[in-house]
Structures are given as C-alpha cells and as structure tokens.
Image (cartoon, grey):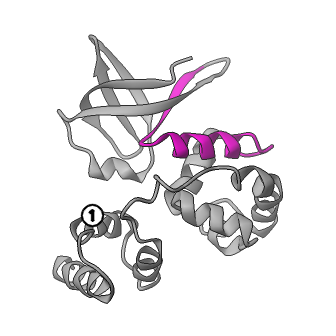
Amino acid sequence: MINSISGKIILIKNNFIVVESHGVGYKIFVGSYTLELKENQDVFIWTYQVVRENALELFGFKSFTELEIFELLIGISGIGPKVALSIMDVSTPASLKRAVVSENTDELTKVSGIGKKNAQKIILELKNKIEKIDLINEENNFDIEIYETLEALGFARHDIREVLKEVENIEGDDKIKEALKILGQRK
C-alpha cells in the first residue's frame, strides 16, 4: 500500500494532481483543496490506494484526519472513493462530524447523488465511529462558524478557505467583517 507521497507537483487538474517523487509521477485524486496548491510546489500527501480489476488509483489528503474520515466513508456499502471525496469536498472534517453526531442530513444532501435516505444511512453507519476521531489539530485557526456563514451567503467554498487563511490572525467579529470585505472585492 502507498500510504503517503512527498514530492513536487508537476500537474494540477480539476480532480487530480500529479506528484513526482524520485522520478515517478503519481496521479492522485484530490478534493477541492487542490485549488490552494501550485505547480512546482513541494507537498506531503497522505494517500489511500484503491486496487480494482482494471485500475489502480490513489486518493490524496492534506491531513491524516481527512484520510481517516475517507476510510470511514468508503467502508459504508454503496459509497465509493469518488463519492466519499465529494462528501469531503462539501464538508470540513469538523462540520461532517457535527452533522453526523447531530443527525443533520442536510449537510450530506448537499452532495450530488446523496439523497435523504443515503444521508441517513451514512449517519447511522458513522455515528459511533466518527466520534472517536480527534479534530483538535485539524481545525487550527479555521473558524467553522464563519465558514458556514459565508457559505450560506453564497460564496464559493474555495474562496472562503482562501480568505479564512488571510484573516486567521484577526480576532472576534472583525474576522467576519474583514472576510466579507475581501470576498466582496473579489466579485
């Protein structure tokens, strides 16, 4: 199994990157955070290898926590790696955990192809497992409430993530004001 790869990004596409490590280019399917990456950037990526009859695929994650959640999702009957990646694109690890624990199907039905019935199945399957995942280090300086507020106002997820990095040193209500100001200038 290939559990992680470090190297230089040589290509970025919509849903995958190619990382060159020791002369070998690895195609790694990734979530929307690829918009934050740049070609020729050195990276370390946690990976999950999927072996099928006609394919060998790698799925990549910025953190070990994301990898753990991905593994939980693909352990659910009917949820394949690409659907699991789509779920993780819609939710941060913390918001997914909160949705599962509070049995909020609305968070999961935002994903294309996941209806109310499948969302309930995911919640039922993950409820006891996801509570064990520690998210303390995962959400460092990432304000999930501001993220969800900005998303509800209609801003794109990748824009919100970018802006939240820019305003991470601002405290309190000033953080959302500054984020709104920056997002407003970008439109």
Residue 121, placed above or below residue 101: above
> Residue shown at 51%/39% (left/top)?
64
Q: Is 53 displayed left or right of 15 in the figure?
A: right
Task: Name the amino acid type tagged 1.
Answer: Lys
Q: Which residues make up the magenta segment?
A: 55-79
What is the total number of numbered labels drawn onto the structure image?
Answer: 1
Query: Height in image: 26 above or below 80?
Result: above
Where residue 137 sits in the image (x, y, percent)? 46, 52
* 65, 79: nearer the viewer: 65
> Residue at label 1?
165
Image coords of residue 159 (percent x, y): 30, 67
Instruction: Estimate the x, y position of residue 181 in percent, counting from the top left.
Output: 20, 85
Q: Is residue 167 above or below residue 1?
A: below
Q: In which quarter of the image is residue 75?
A: top right
Estimate the x, y position of residue 36 in percent, counting from the top left: 28, 51
| Front one among 174 and 186 | 174
Q: Indicate the secondary structure of the residue bearing disc 1.
A: helix
Q: Is residue 90 left or right of residue 105?
A: left
Q: In which quarter of the image is the C terminus?
A: bottom left
Q: Can residue 121 be seen in this view?
A: yes
